[in-house]
Amino acid sequence: MIKMRYKVLNTTQTVRESIYRIMHRKKITKKVIEKKMGCSYPTILCKIENPGNFKFSELLELCNILDEDFNDLLIKIK
């Protein structure tokens, strides 16, 4: 019998990784996000590292900045 090993990712980690992956793919920096969202750089760092800290409206705005569909981001976290 073969035992399968797997790693369970929590949604926060998965969302964070998805955001970074999209930023890298589209070559959008945290500085660009900071300016477009009107938040300070430390706030953006904190919220991207802990996506649960985003307000729903901020997460929608981030998706607009990244030109990513909000539903696609949700599908990635399942």
Image (cartoon, helix red, strand yellow):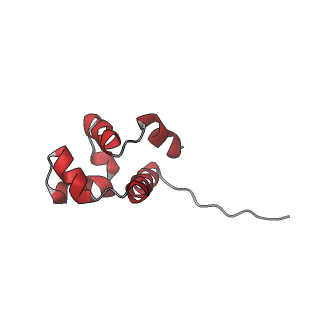
Q: Residue at x 31, y 54 (%)?
A: 48
54 vs 61, nearest the viewer: 61
Extreme residue toward the right, this view? 1
Q: Is residue 45 visible?
A: no
Look at the picture and state if 40 lies above or below 67: below
At 20% from the left and 46% from the top, the residue drawn is 36
Relative depth, front residue between 1 and 15? 15
Q: Visible in this render: residue 46?
A: yes
Horizontal arrangement in the rendering, residue 65 relative to residue 41 (left or right): right
- Residue reaching furthest front? 27
Residue visible at 19% across and 52% down in the picture: 34
Q: Residue at x 42, y 50 (%)?
A: 15
Relative to 65, is 16 on the left or the right? Answer: right
Q: Position of residue 69 (x, y in %)?
A: 43, 37
| Percent of width and height locating residue 10 | 48, 52
Count of number-bearing discs: 0
Look at the image and tell me in which quarter the C terminus lies: top right
Left or right of 54? Residue 15 is right
Location of residue 44 in the rendering, given as x and y in whole percent from the top left corner: 22, 54
Q: Position of residue 21 (x, y in %)?
A: 44, 57
- Specify the quadrant that holds the N terminus: bottom right
Q: Is residue 67 above or below residue 48?
A: above
